[in-house]
């Protein structure tokens, strides 16, 4: 099955995702994995819905891509983690992979907190006494997580890594046409990335996670 075939088969995935999300009983969601999963889905619903509703000419509009690429990059980050955490239908595995996520969070937070140039540090939560989060084991990177899982059709999801890396490049303000013209004497603004395609792929897997892992009424 090609990526285009897969996208066609999931054409209405986001609409189905919306219906299922509305039926989740958040009071029945078990910690610690469930609340993060649910909150990430809410974020996906809000941002992806906004993109689908308001940015319909991404292929032809650099101005629209300047907005959609950073937003989609942020959504993919969370989606990759959710997919990785829930890939194995085993509570111990989910807990272990969630702890990988928490390690990454703690490492990055300690890096932020230890920044000597950071103002108003007293307003931030302090690292717990006698803990050094910088020594925690680093989590897998995005590509390793994508390679570790597959979709319902048996296809690896690492093809999304291309979109992830390109949008990361764009998010850090490195995709300006002027920079490409200076470096290569030709423009490149990554217009081949289709938000609707990526969103429906993400929504399809979130549907699976909701059906298999989140409590419903």
Image: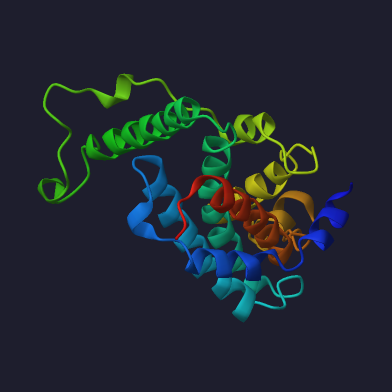
Q: Quadrant of residue 72?
A: bottom right
Q: What residue is drawn where x is 82% and y is 54%?
A: 6
The image shows residue 189, relative to residue 112, as above or below, that is below
Residue 192 seen from this side: yes
Q: Residue 208, percent across and down? A: 62, 50
From the viewer's perspective, tell me whether residue 152 is left or right of residue 72: right
The image shows residue 102, relative to residue 163, as above or below, that is above
Q: Residue 5, percent across and down? A: 87, 55
From the viewer's perspective, tell me whether residue 168 is left or right of residue 215: right
Q: Residue 157, percent across and down? A: 72, 40
Q: Residue 119, percent across and down? A: 17, 49
Residue 186 seen from this side: no
The image shows residue 181, relative to residue 111, as above or below, that is below
The quarter of the rendered structure image containing the C terminus is: bottom left
Q: What residue is drawn where x is 37% and y is 34%?
A: 102
From the viewer's perspective, tell me whether residue 98 is left or right of residue 153: left
Q: What residue is drawn where x is 43% and y is 29%?
A: 100
> Which of 191 and 185 lies nearest the eye of the viewer?
191
Q: What residue is drawn where x is 15% and y is 31%?
A: 128
The image shows residue 102, relative to residue 133, as above or below, that is below
Among all residues in the image, which is located at the extreme front? 217
> Which of 182 and 111 lies nearest the eye of the viewer?
111
**Which colour scheme appears in the figure?**
rainbow
> Which of 18 and 168 lies nearest the eye of the viewer?
18
Q: How many marks?
A: 0
């Amino acid at each position: 099955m090609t990526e285009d075939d897969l996208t066609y088969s999931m054409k209405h995935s986001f609409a189905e995702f919306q219906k299922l999300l509305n039926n989740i009983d958040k009071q029945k969601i078990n910690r610690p994995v469930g609340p993060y999963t649910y909150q990430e889905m809410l974020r996906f619903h809000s941002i992806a819905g906004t993109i689908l509703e308001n940015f319909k000419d991404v292929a032809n509009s650099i101005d629209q891509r300047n907005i959609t690429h950073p937003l989609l990059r942020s959504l993919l980050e969370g989606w990759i983690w959710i997919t990785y955490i829930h890939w194995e239908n085993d509570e111990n595995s989910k807990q272990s992979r969630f702890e990988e996520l928490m390690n990454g969070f703690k490492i990055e937070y300690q890096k932020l907190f230890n920044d000597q140039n950071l103002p108003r540090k007293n307003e931030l939560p302090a690292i717990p006494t006698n803990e050094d989060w910088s020594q925690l084991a680093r989590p897998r990177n995005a590509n390793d997580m994508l390679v570790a899982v597959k979709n319902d059709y048996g296809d690896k999801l690492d093809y999304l890594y291309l979109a992830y890396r390109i949008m990361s490049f764009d998010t850090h303000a490195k995709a300006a046409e002027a920079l490409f013209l200076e470096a290569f004497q030709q423009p490149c603004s990554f217009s081949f990335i289709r938000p609707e395609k990526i969103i429906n792929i993400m929504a399809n897997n979130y549907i699976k996670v909701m059906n298999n892992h989140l409590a419903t009424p």
